[in-house]
Amino acid sequence: MKYLLDKDTNYQCIFEGAVTKTSFSDQKTSKIERYDADYRQTTTQIIQLTNYFKVYSSPYSGAFDLLDTMYIPRPCASAHANLTQMDYFYGQKKKSYNFRDEPSYKVRATNVFAQMDMEKEMVFQNGSQCSSFAWLDSGDLNKNTLLWVQTDEENLVGTQRTVIRGCDNMGKLLEINFYVNVTSNSAPEFTEDIQTQWNLNVGDKINYKLPNFKDPEGNDVGEVYINAMENQEFPTFINYTNATKTINMTPNNLLFQGRTYYFSVVLKEKNSDFMMNIYYMTIKINGDPIDPDDLKPPNKTEVSMQITSLNYKSQG
């Protein structure tokens, strides 16, 4: 048996188990005094309390915040089930959970789910929406027991309590409780600092092997790639060999001279589009800039023409 304490609009479970006769000395401050020497009552008996307190026999009622008055308590489910807690690292891609694949002793959840009508919903246990964190698969909700979890919100780290709630065809409330343990997460890191600035000459051939990297939590493997900077043209003399994790730099054209180029190295978790570290690379090619016209042969005229079509005699 549980007592629910009135604190303005928030009600909390303050006692559970065998209870004794209680005295309420101050309803305004909700002060409770217990007299253990008085007669005892079992948890199956009903104790008449003031409008500040109610007794709920459901083992789950105390876990919910009650938003209505004590005269209209939260209804207790006629049938319920608990799913095995799921572990999830925040920032990773969505993760599935199918409680139809639970061990045989969890068949109860599938049976309760099968009795729910199409109006079922998945919410946090306090009644707030959780669709941006955990949701039922959009397939046939009468048969589909697949759940999805995904979040990039660090404030959801911790145990998140959700419930699948629905009614059967007789209007009786059914609930399946599902806890998700959201664990802290961070992006992989190089084991040593990488070089991010280079001064090269035209004709240089530089092969820079990136250092090893690791994931601090060890929950995922890392992957690395190079990418263009925003609003910057990717330097054409740069390429990346994934097998050896090597950046190859071969500025072999005089037009690169005297210019500065930018790109980035991205190190991320393989199973996340959010957990990543970005390293900004700068390459300066020594020398003075060269005008492309200066590279044209002297005393030559550039001719541009277009032939629309040729016949079999090579005539236009």
Image (spheres, rainbow, N blue to C red):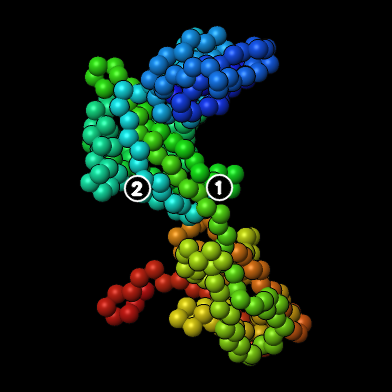
Question: To which quarter of the image does residue 284 belong?
Answer: bottom right
Q: In this orientation, which residue lies closer to the viewer: 115 or 212?
A: 115
Rendered residue at 59%/14% (across/down): 23
Which amino acid type is shown beneath numbered disc 1?
Answer: Val
Density class for disc 1 (Cα within 10 Å; few <14, some 14-19, many ≥20) is some
Rendered residue at 39%/24% (across/down): 58
Q: Is residue 214 visible?
A: yes
Which amino acid type is shown beneath numbered disc 2?
Answer: Tyr
Rendered residue at 45%/45% (across/down): 180
Question: Is 289 positioned to the left or the right of 117 in the image?
Answer: right
What residue is shown with label 2?
Answer: 97
Callout 2: SS: strand
> Where is residue 296 drawn, in percent x and y?
64, 84
> Where is residue 286 drawn, in percent x and y?
74, 84
Mark 1 and mark 2: span between their CA atoms? 19 Å
Q: Quadrant of the C terminus?
A: bottom left
> Where is residue 280 drawn, in percent x and y?
66, 68
What residue is shown with label 1?
Answer: 157
Above or below for 62 versus 108: above
Q: Is residue 283 visible?
A: no
> Where is residue 212 drawn, in percent x and y?
56, 78
Quick one: which residue is furthest to the right in this view? 288
The tag earlier along the polypeptide, 1 or 2, is: 2
Question: Is 287 positioned to the left or the right of 224 in the image?
Answer: right
Q: In this orientation, which residue lies closer to the viewer: 162 or 5?
A: 5
Above or below for 228 versus 19: below
Above or below for 26 versus 314: above
Rendered residue at 29%/17% (across/down): 171
Residues marked 1 and 2 touching at CB (< 8 Å): no
Q: Quadrant of the N terminus?
A: top left
